[in-house]
Image (cartoon, helix red, strand yellow):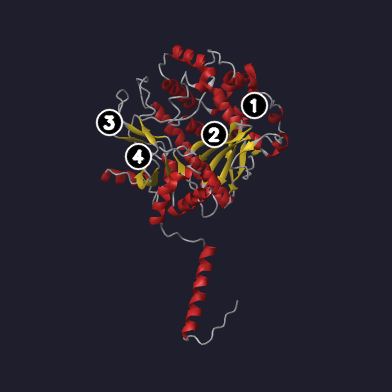
């Protein structure tokens, strides 16, 4: 089934760390739909790109009540119009009423509320990650890692461009699943592709990572990985497989290892409209070597295909790889098993059995396992290459956001300087012109600052000598 994502409102008007919906039309009611602006890129991520200091929640709420103006802003480049301005976070990267479930007569905003809860937990983990950057490593317990993986999957699934086609029965990419989709809609009384998409969004939100993986393990044990893949690509999905979308989640979790990439010193990652879950790279023509999630100007969370793990190099010598990110070598996480690497619980796990793995990972013993990630610090060139992947995929109707104008200017110039990026780089010509006109003065790194001061001092002495004011100067180098 094709993949992508979208958003929904809430029953109670509230402003939280994450998941906020912008109320635009009267009081909320569980039964009466209201217009709400709902983000497909969470606000807690947008705040990392905020122009000016990030204000505490209480101060934001007080200012909003006093002025009626959202006190949070980001740089926003509208590619369609070629205009660069500063816009309220509450009015960008979202769609009105994306997640409202009119079939839920008790609370049409339930999905949005559950998304907000998931985002709140993910925001806390990502905040801890930023604090860990100076250490160069970051350690997560299994349940926290599972929650973060679930967050990333749902951020991909809820993509605004996804809901209309993910379960569209007559979509060319859904040919193998058409009978299953039509049968499922009939059984559940759902009359649209969006309705099916929303149904499974609720399933993903209501189920823990472990629950979804157990549902998928049952399918794998019965049909095998190859059989399930054939159902999608060659044959058809049996109508009775109610939890078949759990297998999509399973492949996302099992086929990629989690890595943390940090931008080079003095450089920043940018954020594009489709840059949260963007796929990159081909292996023998098959897509998805990487899944990219920009979570701040400093950090990108990247899911890299397990075929690119270091120990797999000998097995993929004859595989044709095409990717702009192959020169980045993130290390897979190091597991720290609570019972020891050769503990009794580990030794009884059958790593060839999806069900056995799911049982261990969902157990209390498995919950106590930890994973240590080495943060991959990119070079300036690698940072620009990752940004180039985002820029080459922007659409003419899309947008992009950045933190500092100087960094965006360097990124755009570097992208435009490569002939391989034409004609995509043409979309950035108005942006480069506006950044050139309004370039802000940036603070130099300390090493360059000291060198600049030294050069100015030497130039001043030479000038004084030239004027005859200083008769002799002795420099000890």
Residue 153 to residue 389: above or below: above
Residue 357 shows which numbered tag? 1
Q: Are marks 2 and 3 in contact (CB under 8 Å)?
A: no
Circle 3 Cα neighbour tier, 10 Å, few/some/many (<14 / 14–19 / ≥20): few
Quadrant hosting residue 116: top left
Q: Are marks 2 and 4 in contact (CB under 8 Å)?
A: no
Front-most of residues 430 and 55: 430
Mark-to-mark CA distance, 2 and 3: 35 Å
- Residue 44 visible in the snapshot: yes
For the C terminus, the image quarter is: bottom right
Q: Which residue is mark 2?
A: 149
Give residue 103's position: percent from left, percent from top.
Answer: 37, 19
Q: Are marks 4 and 3 in contact (CB under 8 Å)?
A: no
Circle 1 Cα neighbour tier, 10 Å, few/some/many (<14 / 14–19 / ≥20): some
Give residue 167's position: percent from left, percent from top.
Answer: 47, 21
Q: Which residue is mark 3?
A: 27
Give residue 439's position: percent from left, percent from top.
Answer: 41, 57
Give residue 388's position: percent from left, percent from top.
Answer: 52, 45
Q: Which residue is mark 4?
A: 91
Quadrant hosting residue 341: top right
In primary-sequence order, the first of circles 1 and 3 is 3
Classify mark 3: helix, strand or loop.
Answer: loop
Mark-to-mark CA distance, 4 and 1: 43 Å
In primary-sequence order, the first of circles 2 and 3 is 3
């Amino acid at each position: 089934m094709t993949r992508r994502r979208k958003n929904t409102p809430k029953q109670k008007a509230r402003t939280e760390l994450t998941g906020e919906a912008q109320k635009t039309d009267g009081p909320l009611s569980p039964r009466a739909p209201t217009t709400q602006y709902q983000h497909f890129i969470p606000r807690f991520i947008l705040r990392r790109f905020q122009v000016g200091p990030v204000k505490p929640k209480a101060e934001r709420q007080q200012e909003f009540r006093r002025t009626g103006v959202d006190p949070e802003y980001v740089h926003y480049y509208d590619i369609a119009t070629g205009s660069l301005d500063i816009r309220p976070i509450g009015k960008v990267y979202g769609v009105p009423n994306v997640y409202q479930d009119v079939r839920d007569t008790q609370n049409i905003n339930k999905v949005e509320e559950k998304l907000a809860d998931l985002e709140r937990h993910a925001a806390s983990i990502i905040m801890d990650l930023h604090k860990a950057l100076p250490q160069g490593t970051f350690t997560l317990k299994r349940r926290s890692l599972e929650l973060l993986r679930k967050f990333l999957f749902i951020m991909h699934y809820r993509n605004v461009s996804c809901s209309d086609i993910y379960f569209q029965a007559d979509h060319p990419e859904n040919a193998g699943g058409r009978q299953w989709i039509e049968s499922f809609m009939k059984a559940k009384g759902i009359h649209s592709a969006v309705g099916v998409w929303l149904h499974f969004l609720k399933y993903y939100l209501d189920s823990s990572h472990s629950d979804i993986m157990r549902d998928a393990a049952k399918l794998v044990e019965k049909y095998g990985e190859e059989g399930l893949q054939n159902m999608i690509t060659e044959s058809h999905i049996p109508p009775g497989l109610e939890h078949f979308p759990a297998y999509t989640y399973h492949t996302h979790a099992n086929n990629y290892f989690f890595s943390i990439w940090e931008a080079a010193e003095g450089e920043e990652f940018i954020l594009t409209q489709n840059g949260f879950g963007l796929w990159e790279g081909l292996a023998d023509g098959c897509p998805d070597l990487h899944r990219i999630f920009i979570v701040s100007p400093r950090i990108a969370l990247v899911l890299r295909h397990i075929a690119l793990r270091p120990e797999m190099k000998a097995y993929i010598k004859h595989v044709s790889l095409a990717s702009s990110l192959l020169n980045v070598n993130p290390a897979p996480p190091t597991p720290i098993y609570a019972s020891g690497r050769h503990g009794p619980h580990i030794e009884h796990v059958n790593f060839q059995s999806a069900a056995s793995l799911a049982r261990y990972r969902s157990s209390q013993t498995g919950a106590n396992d930890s994973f240590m990630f080495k943060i991959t610090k990119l070079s300036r060139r690698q940072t620009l290459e990752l940004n180039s992947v985002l820029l080459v995929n922007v659409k003419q109707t899309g947008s992009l956001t950045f933190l500092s104008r100087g960094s965006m200017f360097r990124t755009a110039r570097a992208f435009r300087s490569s002939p391989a990026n034409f004609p995509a780089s043409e979309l950035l010509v108005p942006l480069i012109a506006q950044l050139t006109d309004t370039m802000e003065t940036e603070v130099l790194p300390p090493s360059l600052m000291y060198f600049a001061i030294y050069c100015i001092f030497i130039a001043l002495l030479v000038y004084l000598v030239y004027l005859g004011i200083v008769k002799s100067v002795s420099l000890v180098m």
